[in-house]
Amino acid sequence: MQPLLGKSPQPNSEPSKLLENIWTFGYQATTSVRLLQPQRLISQVPRSQHLWRSDVCALWLPMASPEQLKTRPDSPRGIRELFDSVRGVVVESQGRRYSCRPQRGTGQSSYPQCGKESGAVFLQGQPTKDAFDLIYRDAVWGGDGVSSSKSGRGSSWGVGTKLLCKTITEALMEVAAERQAAGQSDFELNLLDAPSGDFFWMPGCLEHISSKLPEGAKLNYQGVDVSTVAKDTAEGKRASAQASLPKVKIEPFLAMDLSEANILERTFPGKKFDVINCHDALQHNPLSQVKEIVANFNKCANRLVVDVDMAGTNAQDISPGQFRAIDLTDAPFNNKPECLVVNPDPVSVDEREHFAIFKLPLKA
C-alpha cells in the first residue's frame, strides 16, 4: 500500500521535514502544541472530532513511542522531545484529520494469535435495564430482528461474528482437551453467553460448536441479558434452535444485570462455567459497572472470550447504553490474554477491535 502522506520519513530526517502536514496535540482535550508549522497549526480541535484511520497513521505510530525514541541514537533530538511531551499526532490527509496515538496496552504483537479453530445522548441517566430495553424496543442500534440483529451490525451473522464463533469454539476445545487429558471421555462443557442479546447469530455458532465437539462431549448453553425485551426475543427462538441441536442443551434465557454484586453466584449456585462469551457489552457500561461485571465473571468461570479494542479509551466514562472503546490489556486492567485475533470486519475501524481469550480471574 502506498503511504497517503508520501514517502516514509527516515530516522535522520530534519524535524521540520518529518512533521510536514502534521500537528501535535497535548494532554488537554482542546489544546494544541505550537510547533514548526505555526501558519498551518490546527488549534483548539476537540479530541472528539479526531478520527482514527490505520492506513493514514501507519507511518507515524512506529515513531510515537517515547521509550523507543529515547533508545534510538539516530532519532532527531527535536522529535524525541516532541513525543516526550505529547500523546500523539494529528495527521491531515485528503482533507480530513486523523488522531494517531501510540498503541495502548502492550500491543497485538505481544500476544499469541487465536486461530487454532480456523453512543446516544438520550440514554444519559437511564437505569441500565431501561436503557437497554429502549435500545431493543426502538431499534436504536439498527436491525429489524429478522434479516439483521437488533443488537447492532456487530451481532449479525457475518465475517466478524463467524470469527468470534471460531474463537469461542477454540476456547471450548481447549477445555475439552484438558478434560480428555485428565481421562474424561463423557463430559459437559458449560458456555455462558453474557449478554446474549436477541440470540440472532448464536444459533449458527452453536451448530458450528456442536460439529466440533469430541465424541462423548455435550454443550450446555445459557444466555442472559439485562434487557427483558432482548430476553423475551431470544426465548421465542429457543425451541426452534434446540430442535436442530441434539448435542446442545439450550437453557431458558434469563434477564439479569451482570453488574449486580454476586448475581451469577446467586443465580447459578455451585455452577462453574467453562467459557463466558461477552461480546460488545463492556463497551456499553460505565467503568464502575465494567469492574463489577468482570468481578462476577471471575467468581464463576474459567475462561472469557471478549472484545479487546486496541484504540480503547478506558478513562472515558459513559452512561449505560452509550459507547466507548475499552481495552482489557491496558490500564487500569493490564490483563494478558492467552491469544488474540483482529476482527477483519469491525463496526467501526476506530475501535481496532480484536477478539481475545483470557484465563480467569482477571484484574478488574
Image (cartoon, grey):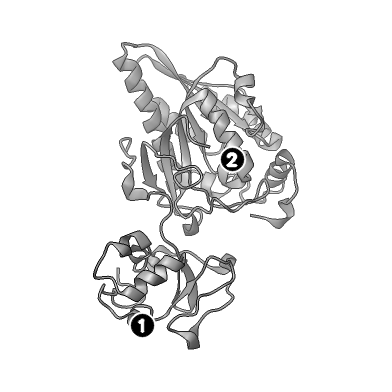
Percent position of residue 133, x then y: 71, 41
Q: Amino acid at mark 2?
A: Val
In front: mark 2 or mark 1? 1
Give the camera-side residue of 167 and 297.
297
Task: Give the mark, 2 or 1, whose residue is nearer the N terminus.
Answer: 1
Q: Residue at x 48, y 79 (%)?
A: 95
- Residue position marked by numbered label 1 in the rendering: 16
Q: Does residue 158 appear in this view?
A: no
Above or below residue 151? Residue 274 is above
Above or below residue 175? Residue 140 is below
**Residue 134, labelled with which disc?**
none
Q: Residue at x 57, y 52 (%)?
A: 315
- Kind of element beneath mark 1: helix
Q: CA distance from mark 2 to mark 1?
A: 44 Å
Q: Quadrant of residue 287?
A: top right
**Residue 290, labelled with which disc?**
2
Percent position of residue 159, x then y: 42, 47
Q: Does residue 144 appear in this view?
A: yes
Above or below residue 91? Residue 322 is above
Classify residue 224 as left or right of residue 73.
Answer: right
Classify residue 256 as left or right of residue 157.
Answer: right
- Dot 2, crowdedness within 10 Å: few (<14), some or many (≥20)? some
Classify residue 37 as left or right of residue 79.
Answer: right
Above or below residue 50? Residue 334 is above
Percent position of residue 259, x then y: 64, 34
Q: Quadrant of residue 265?
A: top right
Residue that extends furthest to the bottom in the rendered view of this protein: 39
- Kind of element beneath mark 2: helix
Q: Residue at x 45, y 80 (%)?
A: 35
Q: Amino acid at mark 1?
A: Ser
Give the camera-side residue of 222 and 204.
222
Mark 2 and mark 1 residues within 8 Å of each other at the beta carbon: no
